[in-house]
Image: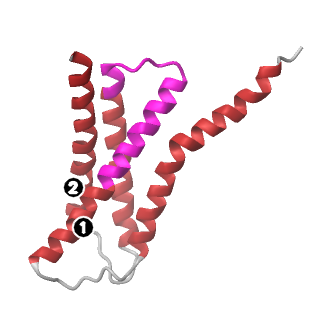
Amino acid sequence: MVKANSSKAPASGARNFIFSWGPVLVWMAAIFYASSQNTWTLVQGPPSAQALRKSAHVWEYSALALLVGRALLATWTARGAILSRPLMLNMWRVGVLISSLYAASDEIHQAFVPRREFHVTDIAIDTLSATAALGIWYILYIRRRNA
């Protein structure tokens, strides 16, 4: 005999997956699209323009890391994990890893876009941004928990 609730479980799981990981995939697609544009020319501008271009890396990969962290926590807690310090630490580690790997793949992608280049420093900026964003989230969680 099949329970009436059993048919809703896969739909609920799919819905949770879409709500958790959908924003991550949309943000990754937005990064990919922006990286595909050759309007970001190699022309060197004033230092303020260069700083603005590099700050875009900080914001886009901080946002990506936070979206990945949110999705990881949603996935793990849906599978029965309890929100705890070790879980948050794992979220930080895995979130930084996923964001860093995507940053590296994005730079490789840019190497094939006309008037774009591969820069190891951009991967470093992206990784540090993801590390900082998730690190701040982790610190705030610990402080809130200990308060």
Where is residue 74 drawn, in percent x and y? 48, 32
Question: Which residue corresponds to the image point at 22% horizontal and 16% vertical from the top-left?
Answer: 146
- Element type at marker 2? helix
> Mark 2 to mark 1: distance in Å?
9 Å
The part of the image, by quadrant, that contains residue 32 is bottom left
Report crowding for label 2: few under 14, some 14 to 19, many 20 or more residues within 10 A (C-alpha). some
Question: Which mark is first along the chain, 1 or 2?
Answer: 1
Residue topped by disc 1: 119
The vertical placement of 81 against 23, above or below, is above
Quadrant into which the N terminus falls: top right
Magenta stretch, residue numbers: 61-88
Task: Identify residue type, mark 1.
Answer: His
Q: Residue at x 40, y 70 (%)?
A: 34
Image location of residue 24, percent across then percent down? 47, 49
Residue under numbered circle 2: 124
Q: Is residue 3 shown above or below 61?
A: above
Give the answer, above or below, for where 113 lies relative to 73: below
Magenta-drawn stretch contains 42: no
